[in-house]
Amino acid sequence: MSALIAIDDAHWFVRDQGRAEAPATLLIHGFTGCAQFWDAIVDRLTPEFRCVTVDLAGHGQTRVPARIELYRLPAVADALARVMTEIGIVRAHVWGYSMGGRLALQFALRHPNRCDRLVLESASPGIADATERANRRRADDALADRIEQIGVDAFVAEWMAKPIFAGQQALPQTIRERASALRKQHTAEGLAMSLRGMGTGAQEPLHDLLPSLATPTLILAGEHDPKFRAIGAQMHDQVPNSVFRIVPGVGHAPYWEAPERTVSLVTPFLNGDEPPQLVDEEG
Ligand code: MLT
């Protein structure tokens, strides 16, 4: 089913797929993504798992009032916990990609009793260094202003041309066009609010809390994404109950670039087994 779920004065677009009795898995998209970005993953995870996908604040069909405090990571994490309650889910596995990975981490730290197993894909705990964080915040704010100036279509074209997504040029044209069309459904105001509220520069860094994270955690990074491989390795050192796996042959978005390969790592992990090692982590 898909539904708009009211939480206070916001409406959250939620899709709930798979058998109701199967273990629930919440899938959280990245910046400019939406629930449909997970379709290839949902196809592979159901019926073994019940898959819940949402449109985040500022994205897709979700409507959150334009108050910046509602776009902060802790507020969005709390809203997701309430969405889960509304659809009758007490505990779920949580898998977040990029911005959604930062949110998934926040969720697991704030709601440890609601999170069974955590998958952090191309994610970070924020930026620890105050100067670097302030610089990133300025850059994200400038990007938010730019979205409002040039509009969503032009922004999406610029965004997808970023070097971090270079690997996606090799994907079939239909898949690239689908990504572009899905990203263009957003509003400039929504994307700008998202960047200002939950951009990497705006978030409180979570590094100090990583050693207290008891949730079993799978950290994923693409083979050709050196920045997030390095961040992933650092998080792995800090999170006690974590495994770190590299997804071969892909860049920043393993779940999108190679859904089959990514699921071959995630499914065993969600079942409590050791995920296979497809690439030497040190290599
Ligand atoms: C993010 O920042 O969340 C991602 O890089 C978004 C994307 O895939 O475009």
Image (cartoon, grey):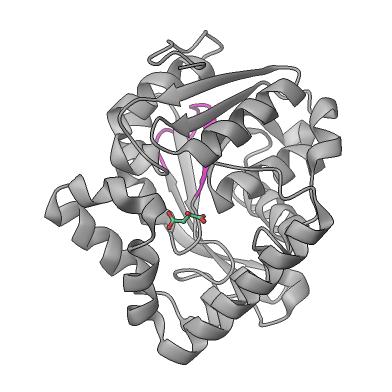
**Residue 71 can be seen, yes or no:** no
Name the residue located 56 percent from the left edge and 12 percent from the top edge. 272
- Read off the magenta span: 17-28
Image quarter of residue 9: bottom right
Closest to the observer: 167 or 30? 167
Number of numbered tags placed on the structure image: 0
The reply, left or right, for residue 78 in relation to residue 95 is right
Magenta-drawn stretch contains 57: no
Magenta-drawn stretch contains 21: yes
The reply, left or right, for residue 2 in relation to residue 134 is left
The reply, left or right, for residue 187 in relation to residue 209 is left
Figure check: 179 above or below 24: below
Residue 90: image location, x then y, percent: 68, 37
Figure check: 213 above or below 9: above
Closest to the observer: 157 or 273? 157
The reply, left or right, for residue 111 in relation to residue 161 is right
The quadrant the C terminus occupies is top left
Residue 236: image location, x then y, percent: 66, 23
Image quarter of residue 230: top right
Closest to the observer: 188 or 2? 188
Image quarter of residue 64: bottom right
- In this view, which residue lies farthest toward the left? 173
Name the residue located 20 percent from the left edge and 52 percent from the top edge. 175
Residue 126: image location, x then y, percent: 71, 49
Residue 130: image location, x then y, percent: 83, 57
Figure check: 235 above or below 3: above
- In this view, which residue lies farthest toward the bottom? 149
Name the residue located 65 percent from the left edge and 49 percent from the top edge. 103
**Residue 207 can be seen, yes or no:** yes
